[in-house]
Image (spheres, rainbow, N blue to C red):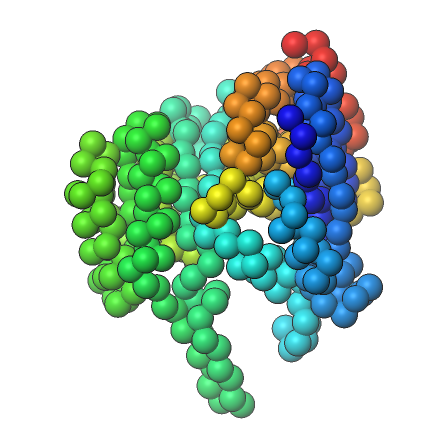
């Protein structure tokens, strides 16, 4: 297979973890005989410094030509002025909109060797395997915004079509898993949530009668993620609720450095990134966990390139090195030697070669 991958390392630890993701991608490609070309471009704070915008036109053009996009992270203290007209996060929001990436998939699985890292009691973690499907281009993040000296407004808006398309993605995912979909809303208060709930109910009855559906208020969902996380299969959420709940769910695994994500649209092109941020205090120290980025590469192989075997092989390589105790400082635990970012990436490449 020939494919073009757009690479957006971004800021902070982004370039470090993306480098290890690319190393794993190259190892898989060599082993399977694929030709995967990569081209880098700017996004986020570094793009602001060099071009005055968080998402240069050249970056958008490259991403539109590419079969998939691999992204690191954006932002940092240098650009952290709430009053600034140009901010790194604008680049991330805009690239999702430009590419029509409306569905964000965040799988949350727990490796047996890392149960002790989670702050939850081990008996609560038995059987945790869930997927958060978050609507990505609507809601309060993209609604109309106004501000005066004494008042600010952020508008949350959804259409039936927007809800239907994300609900289809979540329901299809649930159909391929344990056939249970939990739709999260705040229908006791918000009109957008009432529309969301009614639309999801109608779609599921019409197109997915084999998938069990329940509706849960967002505050209850947040509580149940901690009290009984194994009860969830697929969680369907609007934009802001999904942003918050998926970060909460990452605590189950013990570190954001372990969780990948995929942002998808109508076609096969997707954007793949770890769920963590740019972690400025860790930048340049070689201690960041690259596993979330490497697992994001596995999602890239699966969803954009259709290479399921290679995706599974990469996921299995990460699982093996974790089982072997190759752990970065965020999950190694006190008193245990911690691997560097490069050592963890190298271990995955070696595991690919040994398989």
Taking the spot 48% from the left edge, 65% from the top edge, the residue there is 141
Left/right placement of residue 355 relative to residue 192 reads right
Taking the spot 35% from the left edge, 50% from the top edge, the residue there is 165
**Quick one: 285 or 311, which is closer to the camera?**
311
Q: Position of residue 161 (x, y in %)?
A: 32, 57
Can residue 118 be seen by looking at this rendering? no
Picture quadrant where residue 204 is located: top left
Q: Specify the quadrant that holds the N terminus.
A: top right
Taking the spot 37% from the left edge, 49% from the top edge, the residue there is 166
Can residue 4 be seen by looking at this rendering? yes
Q: Position of residue 192 (x, y in %)?
A: 30, 65
**Height in image: 8 above or below 150?**
above
Left/right placement of residue 28 relative to residue 255 reads right
Q: Position of residue 54 (x, y in %)?
A: 69, 64
Q: Position of residue 70 (x, y in %)?
A: 65, 42
**Height in image: 140 above or below 14?**
below
Taking the spot 68% from the left edge, 40% from the top edge, the residue there is 5
**Height in image: 317 above or below 140?**
above
């Amino acid at each position: 297979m020939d494919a073009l991958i757009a690479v957006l390392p971004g800021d902070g630890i982004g370039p470090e973890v993306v480098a290890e993701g690319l190393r794993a991608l190259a190892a898989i490609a060599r082993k399977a005989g694929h030709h995967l070309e990569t081209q880098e471009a700017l996004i986020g704070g570094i793009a602001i410094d060099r071009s005055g915008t968080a998402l240069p036109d050249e970056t958008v053009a490259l991403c539109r030509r590419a079969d998939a996009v691999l992204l690191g992270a954006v932002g940092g203290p240098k650009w952290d002025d709430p009053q600034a007209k140009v901010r790194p996060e604008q680049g991330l929001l805009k690239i999702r909109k430009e590419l029509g990436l409306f569905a964000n998939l965040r799988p949350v699985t727990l490796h047996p060797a890392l149960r002790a890292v989670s702050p939850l009691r081990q008996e609560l973690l038995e059987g945790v395997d869930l997927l958060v499907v978050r609507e990505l281009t609507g809601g309060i993040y993209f609604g109309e915004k106004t501000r005066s000296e004494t008042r600010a407004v952020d508008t949350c808006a959804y259409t039936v079509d927007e809800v239907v398309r994300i609900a289809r993605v979540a329901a299809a995912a649930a159909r391929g898993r344990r056939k249970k979909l939990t739709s999260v809303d705040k229908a006791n208060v918000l009109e957008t949530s009432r529309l969301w709930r009614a639309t999801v109910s109608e779609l599921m009855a019409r197109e997915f009668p084999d998938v069990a559906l329940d509706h849960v208020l967002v505050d209850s969902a947040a509580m149940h993620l901690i009290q009984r996380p194994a009860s969830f299969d697929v969680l369907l959420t609007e934009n802001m609720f999904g942003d918050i709940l998926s970060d909460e769910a990452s605590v189950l695994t013990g570190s954001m450095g372990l969780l990948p994500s995929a942002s998808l649209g109508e076609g096969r092109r997707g954007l793949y990134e770890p769920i963590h941020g740019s972690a400025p205090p860790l930048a340049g120290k070689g201690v960041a966990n690259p596993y979330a980025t490497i697992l994001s590469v596995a999602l890239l192989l699966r969803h954009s390139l259709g290479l399921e075997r290679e995706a599974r092989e990469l996921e299995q390589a990460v699982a093996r090195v974790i089982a072997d105790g190759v752990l970065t400082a965020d999950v190694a635990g006190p008193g245990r030697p911690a691997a560097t970012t490069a050592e963890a990436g190298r271990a995955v490449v070696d595991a690919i070669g040994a398989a």
